[in-house]
Amino acid sequence: MSDQPITETHIAIIGGGIIGLTLALALRQRNVEVLVVEADHIASGASGAAAGMLTPIFEMHHWPAKGRDRLKNFGQQSLDLWQGLAEKLSAETGFETGFERCGALGLACGVDLYGDFLENIIAKKWAKAFTTNLGLGQKQTHRQGALVAGEGQISPVQTCQALAVLLKKMGGALIQGMPVERIDFSENNSSPSTLYFLNRKIRAQKIILANGAGASRLWQEEFACPVFPVKGQALMLGLTAEQAKKMPVKLLRGPDCYICVKSDRELLIGATEHRGVDEKNIEEDDNRLLLERAEKLLPFVSRLPRLRAWAGIRPGIADHAPILDQSQRFAALYYAIGHYRNGVLLAPLSAQIMAEKIISNKAVPAPFRLSRFT
Ligand code: FAD
Ligand code: GLY
């Protein structure tokens, strides 16, 4: 053990997903020395599986009633932050992030409570009533929906790549293929803590846990980790440029399914939710379920060729709000975990809140505090 190579850094971030990378960049932009340690490769976790929707209003349908409006406001703030961040990433790295405020359209699928949800967001003036025939051909009937013009999407994998490139360009460090096995905290809060790998040690003044659904494996509090795995399976279908042009908007939202036109060749259907499931096997039953649900939104999906199916593990949390806070047990430890269905959306705001907490000890907004679990 004693001849293991040792790396020293000011801040070590565990996890190279969208949350760890966005935070690393935010810290680097504030001149902090930072190192991201990723077990596999960047975006190998939930971030690489995500659809990339930036749709706070439509996500409200999935959140518990308590705190829903505040989460929506945070989501909208973060969506606004994406605009500037995506522009910066493209300008500085030459990578396309796929960021666009293309609008999202919610459609009720028969008799269900989703119609009430859509009416409610129209009544609150968060969405506008919208009639569409969805480009279905002669047989179509017109359908009423709710359009949120300012919502949009991004390509999560390209964005993570751009974040990593810009981080390195600005002097930040990233190690991939290195699972952190344990963290040893010094009892004396002023001396560095140590991260242990199979054949390497890293000493850091501060450590941030941003390891998504793996959070419970490195959790350090004296109560159980509130983050649990939620498997999500999704499908990509092939689209012709002509079909893509007929779509009234690129994002369609239904009660239990969504459709995203990701390019003029690809249409994504997402996603299942299996609580407590921590494996990424592709289930044919889930593919069928996704297609059945998507057909209710857009009947011609059943005729599209299937390109691929994949699954990711969301870092679930009961109230759908992440933990963005300092540990109650070790002053050197911080958490940026539990982004559940909304890590892509919330990444820039989470990064800002965390950076301000770490550098200036600015208070974290109440919905994101660790103390809500104690
Ligand atoms: P992750 O992306 O999982 O990153 C954590 C990283 O930590 C991983 O790369 C992992 O390898 C690494 N790690 C774990 N343990 C260790 C260790 N011991 N040492 C070192 N590294 C470690 N969100 C949206 O906002 N919009 C969407 O449209 C959307 N769609 C989704 C669709 C699907 C199918 C799924 C599954 C999720 C979707 N999400 C969406 C949710 C979003 O993907 C997550 O909230 C987000 O990716 C969480 O990011 P993260 O960085 O916390 O976690
Ligand atoms: N936010 C979409 C999903 O998690 O599937």
Image (cartoon, rainbow, N blue to C red):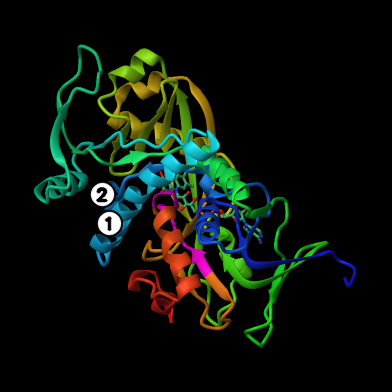
Please tell me in which quadrant of the rendered image residue 206 appears. Answer: bottom right
Q: Give the range drawn in magenta.
A: 335-345
Q: Is residue 91 above or below residue 174?
A: above
Answer yes or no: do the residues labelled 1 and 2 have beta carbons within 8 Å? Answer: yes
Camera sees residue 101:
yes
What residue appears at the point 54 percent right and 38 percent down from the top-left corner?
A: 93
Magenta-span inclusion, residue 142? no
Q: Nearer the viewer, residue 132 or 357?
A: 357
Q: Which amino acid does label 1 sit on?
A: Lys
Mark 1 or mark 2: whose residue is earlier in sequence: 2
| Residue 150 found in image quarter | top left
Residue 102 horizontal/vertical position (percent): 30, 33
Q: Quadrant of the N terminus?
A: bottom right
Q: Can residue 311 be seen in this view?
A: no
Up/down of 355 relative to 87, above or below: below
What secondary structure is found at the residue carrying circle 2? helix
In whole angstroms, how far apart are the C-alphas of marks 1 and 2? 6 Å
The answer to if 340 sits in the magenta stretch is: yes
Front residue of 212 and 151: 151
Q: Is disc 2 surrounded by few (<14), some (14 to 19) or many (20+) residues within 10 Å?
A: many
Residue 167 or 309: which is nearer the viewer? 167
Q: Which residue is drawn at 68% across and 50% down?
A: 40
User: In the figure, is residue 211 to the left or right of 77?
Assistant: right
Q: Which residue lies furthest to the left in this view?
A: 123
The residue identified by callout 1 is 72
Going by the image, does 105 lie left or right of 5? Answer: left
Residue type beneath disc 2: Ile
As displayed, is residue 327 above or below residue 31?
Answer: below
Quadrant occupied by the C terminus: bottom left
Q: Whole-percent x and y of residue 96?
A: 48, 33
Residue designated by label 2: 57
Residue 247 appears at what percent x and percent y? 29, 23
